[in-house]
Image: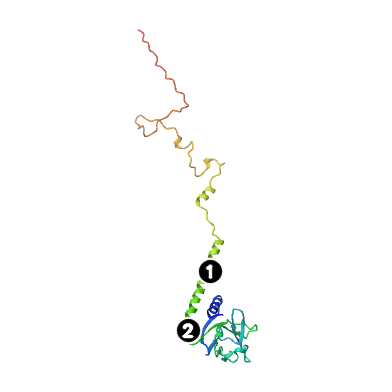
Amino acid sequence: MSVYQLLIWILLEQTMASGEILYIFGVREQSVDISCEPKPENTQLTAFHLYRKSDQRKDLLLSVNQTGDKIHRPDYRRRIRISGRLNSSRVNVTLLDLRKEDTGLYVCEFRTAAKSQQVLKPTDVILLVKDGDCSCVSHTSLIYIITAAVVLLLFALSFLSAAHYRKAHPQPVTEAPIYEQMTTATPAHRSADHHPNQTHPTAKDPVYAVPQKMGNGDSPYAVPRTVKSICEAPQQESSPELVVETN
């Protein structure tokens, strides 16, 4: 696994986790110190373990307890030095004669004196080993770039998840006021006279009332003239009587 692939895998994994991450840079054939402290501090400790973790497995490198310490990997036995004990609440591990393949993720794990041997919050240590002088600035910039890319990726995934949820659970559409008026309309079998909001004219409305006859002094435009009904038969006018004077 290359350094870049390792960094991407480590950052993707640690972004999902909540543990502390430490970055250590080293040069090949030199030494580097890995300082491990329990969280929280001032805790009665019974054991310390240092693991080497990859994408496939988790190997135990070092164990420290009240009776002593033990190095489990043969290829690390001559290259590991331990300083500090469990009662000092700090264990320092010095890795000598660094090699290119030492680049990777190391996990510091403490156990308490509780009956269940409670495991405290682990500390992850990322070790980067480079040939020659360590250009830490370039490594740091690379880590920042990859971290920003991971954060942007998580933000994009969160946005897509929210959009998918809104699409799967659409908000209910409220009815327009016109539909509310239609639902509260008077049924057809009820009389229009009993409707509270009657808008159609009836026979009792003033528009159907019989207009009054216009007086002599009234204006013909003030009150409409009386119109005879077409149903009424025209009355015969009586002829004037002939008056005969007698001498």
Instruction: Please determine whether, in this image, residue 243 is positioned above or below residue 187.
Output: above
Residue 125 position, x and y percent, is 54, 83
Give how far apart the Cα atoms at labels 2 and 1 are: 33 Å
**Secondary structure beneath label 1:** helix
Quadrant in which residue 17 is drawn: bottom right
Asked which quadrant contains residue 67, the reply is bottom right
Q: Are marks 2 and 1 in contact (CB under 8 Å)?
A: no
Residue located at (53% from left, 66% from top): 160
Q: Indicate which disc, 2 or 1, sits on the residue closer to the N terminus.
A: 2
Residue 213 percent across, percent down from the top left: 40, 30
Packing grade of label 1 (10 A; few <14, some 14-19, many >=20) is: few
Label 2: which secondary element: helix
Q: Quadrant of residue 112?
A: bottom right
Please tell me which residue is depicted at 52% across the width and 71% down the height of the picture: 153
Q: Which residue is mark 2?
A: 136
How many C-alpha atoms fall within 10 Å of the one at disc 2: few (<14), some, or many (≥20)?
Answer: some
In terms of depth relative to the viewer, which is nearer, 51 or 112?
51
Q: Which amino acid type corresponds to the residue marked 1 in the rendered image?
A: Ser
Residue receiving disc 1: 158
Q: The N terminus is located in which quarter?
A: bottom right
Q: Extreme top residue here?
A: 247
Query: Disc 2 marks which amino acid?
Result: Cys
State the mark number for residue 82.
none
Is residue 47 among the parts visible in the rendering? Answer: no
Q: Taking 188 as reference, is 236 above or below it?
A: above
Q: Position of residue 203 (x, y in %)?
A: 48, 36
Q: Is residue 146 visible?
A: yes
